Image (cartoon, rainbow, N blue to C red):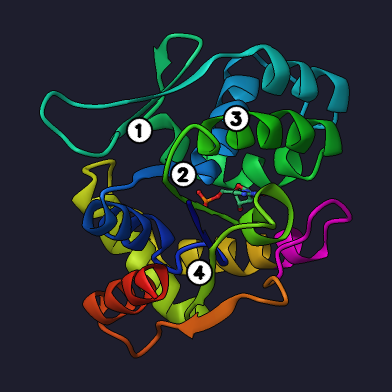
Amino acid sequence: MIVAIDGPSGAGKSTVAKAVAHELGFSCLDTGAMYRAVACKALADGVDLADADALAAIARDARIEFLHQCGEPMPSQVAIDGRDVTAAIRTGDVDRAVSPVSAVPAVREALVAQQQRIGRAGDYVVEGRDIGTAVFPEAAVKVFLTASAEERAHRRVRQNVDRSVGSIDFDEVLADIVRRDELDSSRASSPLRAADDAVLLDSTAMHIEEVIGAICELARA
Ligand code: C5P
């Protein structure tokens, strides 16, 4: 069974997806981390972000792994070609690079194929931008989770503090969120949008527990 959670940056998808997976006894897949890992490797290798073929080669050939810390139920670390990029994929450089990388159709094709292989191996909560529309259009539960841009920026700042990956400036984060919303929604290949049969959840004024409870209820119905 697949529970698809889509929505814009900072809507709380990661936290909610992990908690829902934990409640339901499912595994959890963060597809944004895969696009981020490809962007991170492209930057580290000095690849020109306008070179679609080189970006597609990374997405096709690099080995992306989600790793568990000993005793943790959900994976908390990401590696690409054996390099731990857990912190590196959350930097401002990767925030800026990831939208152009994810707009390359051949990058999406390669990562979507990997996501489908992973998700079909078990019960998964899968979070991203195009899960309900393109990756798992047959998902049993589809949720489109959003919140106001300001609220999402506040959450992103808090999340970075919690993840101990350094403090970031609120105005910069807000500008990045607005810019990425625009790029992700306007790209030609699988733009960010709610599936026609998705349940829309605006979490701006909701407590996270309410959001988690609402999605678990949908999955158990
Ligand atoms: O969810 P997160 O903010 O980590 O995603 C980073 C970026 O990866 C998004 O801004 C988007 O460009 C891309 N992405 C995507 N499709 C997905 C997940 C993420 O295009 N399924």
Q: Which mark is nearer the camera, 4 or 1?
A: 1
Find the distance from the CA under tag 3 to the CA under tag 2: 14 Å
- Horizontal and vertical percent position of residue 210: 27, 81
Q: Which mark is nearer the camera, 3 or 1?
A: 3
Find the distance from the CA under tag 2 to the CA under tag 4: 22 Å
The amino acid type, in three-letter code, at marker 3 is Arg
The amino acid type, in three-letter code, at marker 2 is Asp
What is the residue that sits farthest to the bottom in this orientation?
A: 205
Q: Is mark 4 on a helix, strand or loop?
A: helix
Find the distance from the CA under tag 3 to the CA under tag 1: 26 Å
Find the distance from the CA under tag 1 to the CA under tag 2: 15 Å
Instruction: Name the residue located 51 percent from the left edge and 76 percent from the top edge.
Output: 146
**Of the pair 46 and 58, the residue shown nearer to us:** 58
Q: Vertically, is 175 above or below 125?
A: below
Mark 2 near ligand 1 (CB under 8 Å)?
yes
Q: Vertically, is 46 above or below 190?
A: above
**Of the pair 218 and 65, the residue shown nearer to us:** 218
Residue holding disc 3: 117
Q: Is mark 1 on a helix, strand or loop?
A: loop
Residue holding disc 2: 30
Sequence-wise, which precedes: disc 3 or disc 4?
Answer: 3
Sequence-wise, which precedes: disc 4 or disc 1?
Answer: 1
Q: Are marks 3 and 4 in contact (CB under 8 Å)?
A: no
The amino acid type, in three-letter code, at marker 1 is Ala
Instruction: Name the residue located 75 percent from the left edge and 38 percent from the top edge.
Output: 108
Magenta residues span: 182-193
Mark 1 near ligand 1 (CB under 8 Å)?
no
Q: Vertically, is 51 above or below 105?
A: above
